[in-house]
Image (cartoon, rainbow, N blue to C red):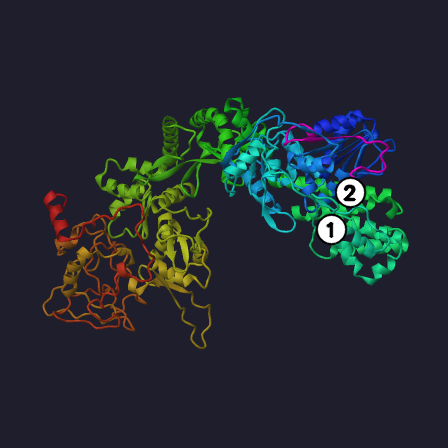
Amino acid sequence: MSPLSDRQMFPSRVKAVLGPTNTGKTHLAITRLLAHSSGIIGFPLRLLARENYDRMVAAKGERHVALITGEEKIVPPGAKWFACTVEAMPLDRQAEFVAVDEIQLCADADRGHVFTDRLLNARGLVETMFLGAETIRPLLQRLVPQAEIESRPRLSQLTYAGPAKLTRLPSRSAVVAFSAGEVYAIAEAIRRRRGGCAVVMGRLSPRTRNAQVALYQNREVDFLVATDAIGMGLNMDVDHVAFANLQKFDGHRPRLLNPQEAAQIAGRAGRGMRDGTFGVTADCPPLSDEMVYKIEGHHFEPLTTLAWRNSDLDLGSIDGLLDSLARPPPFQGLARGNDATDHVTLEALSREPEVRRLAGSRARVRLLWEACQIPDFRKLADESHTRFCARVFGHLAQEGTLPADWAESQIAYLDNTEGDLDTLMARLSGIRTWTYVAARADWLKDATAMQEAARAAEDHVSDALHERLTARFVDRRAAHLIRKLDEGEDDLLSAVARNGDVVVEGHPVGQVKGFVFETSADAEDEEERKVMLRAARRALREEMPRRVAALEAAPDEAFGLTKFQRITWKAEGADEPAEVAKLKPGTSPEKPVIEPIDSEFIDSAQRDRIRAKLATWFDALVARDFAPLIEAEAKAAEDAELRGHLFRLREYLGLLPGGTEREITPELRGKLKAIGVRAGRFALYIPEMLKPRPMALRAQLWALKANSAVPSLPGGGLVSIVPPRDWPRGFAATMGWVQAGPALVRLDVAERIAGELGHLTRRSPAALPMDVASRLGAKADTLPAVLNALGFRLLASEPLEEGAYGPPAPQLVAARREDSQRHRGPRREGAEGEARGLREGQDRRGRDRPRRDAAPATPAEGAPLPEGAEAAPAEGAAPAEGTPAVAREGRPPRGPRRDNRQGQGQGQRQGGERAAGAPEAGRGGDRGRPDRGPRPPGDAPRGPRPEGQRFEGPRGEGPRGDRGPRRDRRDDAPPQPRPVFEARRDKAADPDSPFAVLARLKLGKT
């Protein structure tokens, strides 16, 4: 075969322009093309053909420029200049100028035979131009000896910059990888660290590729991640090329890049007169010195062979076609490359009898060969492409055209924008296949409609793919901010809105809450948050002093407390309060330490100003909510005895759990009541401090000392509640709730009802008031347990005797037997010796101590009955004659006496009850017992117990069996834990001890 085509009337001028990248070869070819009246230029990629088609349209107009690729044909009737892929060049057209770009691809084992065919056979009528690398010079001179060879130097310098991390890459960098997975991973990393990037891959449609390139060229992003597709003449403003890998899969096996391939990619850096750099990044090892030398100096080994396949095919039969495809090359320097997809498909179909039957003529064999040349864009590595080609050939051989409904349904199925990136790119590959088929006007009845449908489907999927790529790999806000920050922070336009939103260069970057900046919620990782914080600093440096001044001028209503002991501030215009400080335990419960929350935007002087303002607010809060306690302290300032109790109340923030009847005399109780303090059965407290606001503040301070969150408090107006599960031990008593069996009863309600029932049952069981259950908020089934916890018991009413008529007996309530001295309070350890001595002999009034469940004691012979035994002295009256001084001094009035007799004047109780008027067994004297009033009529005077006489009864066994269980050791009593904010103190002195009485005598207070 002659290198010259027989159809040429005279030899044209053949010129080869060789040189490295960025030498202006393609620009020269386009200029020469448009200088002729007609011309055809072939590019290695559809993307390049489309890019230069747009340039030609801009120069000559759309009516005169055509685009022909495997999938797309735009051929106006008056087209003179054609931009094509090398495979789609219309060699049957005569044109004055013909050019082929990247001619060194003749050596490619897969596609090289197409380029070699164009080198040997494609000629323009006037001029032919081949563009490529210097490595093809020796073979080109041998195969095309008439060609003029021109070498062009690179316009800029290309320098190796070494390895660099992704975070250190300079702006306007392109990162090159060789698989979709690598491209995605690197693009995601750049988005997190540098704001985003554009993505260019060979599988993208021209529409998607152009949209991605526009992102980069318009400087919406400063980085580009691409496959080696950028090495084929894609001209972009790239300053640095970084290899993320040096190994690629060439369709058959993984292999390392050769220096020429690496130089082709690295040469994309530095366009025009701008110098460029190249290097490695990510996990790629550094380039060897030899490869760096070859790339920088463009020193490459010349090509020794070019891929070749016979283009003079025998279409007489399938076997003849296969034999002609297998023909060896005719010239030295040419070699057979890898079998192309069309050859492999033909061999597979040749083994099918049905295909051989249909391909019985020269026209059918040509039709079969054209069907086998349908590109396999999907590359699924299975028989799907072979089956598709067989079906196309079958329809064309039997019906003449492809079924319209089949083509329409396939295109409609692929026109789907749902799915991830890989799914959309797979659909684009399928659409490209149908676009190629639709471009064959002789294969479809309405080829134009099919072409439009395929183009519309490609546009839809391409747009969706571009949106997915942009959404996944581009953060326009971060990219814009990084670029502006690199240019200089002083030029940033920033502002803080009234609600705290921070806007920089028109992008919301976060919000100021109090004095802390929080990055935008859509910031996905630490790198992106750092960018936003860096961008916001300039605005916040001016905003924070203004906020400090606003806090100092804010009213008290703008501050509040959270359940975690944080102080919040709602700035003017803010949507919600923000935390500005936290509380820490201080020297006293009501004076915690206020610590402003750490912020890099406020200095120590501003922190002191914040602390001073918040301390003033908190003091005002305590003064307002604890006003009853403060007022009571002021009233008790002149009375030393009251000051001690108010000091304790201060430590307990207005409520001291525990009984008070033993420690506080009736006279002192009256004084406390006059200043608003109640000394009750269950606590010493100020009723006003049980209101919701003081209780809420007391809960805050309790939780602060306990180092826990504030438990939830019940709503106002509740009388009793079920004990909440989240309440820690001791919290209920501190908040003013009394454990009453299965429920918690409000302290003031428990005190009021217990006092009323105590008065009713002071002598004998009494009818239970009908409203007790409702006042306690207790149900009928829980009422006995609640009353039992309060110190009372329900007695079953006696049924009417048989034959008797009348209303049923009312339910009775009585003091608990083991708690008959409930009002005396817990016994102190210091008085046990004295009480034990009184139990062994006479009490302080000279009376012996019979058991309550035994018969009246017989006075010992000659033992006189003490005077005044009939009645106890009233409050303020002189003690009865004969009463020992120790018993008279320091003893509180005893109040009405409890009596469980069924009637008055009976000399003896039935069923083991104590004698009428006899004191309850087990009492160790009358110390600390409220005055029980005069003895009722009919009570027999009590004589002294005989010496050594012991009374046995059902009250219990052992040394304490005659007294019942101690009040301070009751198992069913509500727990009285020490509040967490009080340090343990020594036990108070017993005012009834002989030492205390002696001390008062010496001081003259008797």
> Crowding at label 1, few (<14), some or many (≥20) Cα neighbours within 10 Å?
some
Left or right of 589? Residue 940 is left
- Which residue has dot 2 on it? 71
Question: Is residue 851 shown above or below 410?
Answer: below
State the separation of the CA atoms marked 2 and 1. Answer: 17 Å
Q: Nearer the viewer, residue 373 or 664?
A: 373
Please, is residue 915 above or below residue 603 in the view? below
| Visible residue check, residue 623 | no
Q: Position of residue 527 (x, y in %)?
A: 50, 37
Residue assigned mark 1:
341
**Mark sitting earlier along the chain (2/1):** 2
Identity, as a three-letter code, of the amino acid under mark 2? Glu
- Which residues are the magenta region? 1-25
Would you say 943 lies left or right of 191 here?
A: left
Question: What is the x, y in percent for residue 400?
Answer: 90, 52
Tag 1 secondary structure: helix
SS class, disc 2: loop
| Residue 89 placement (x, y as % from top left) | 79, 38
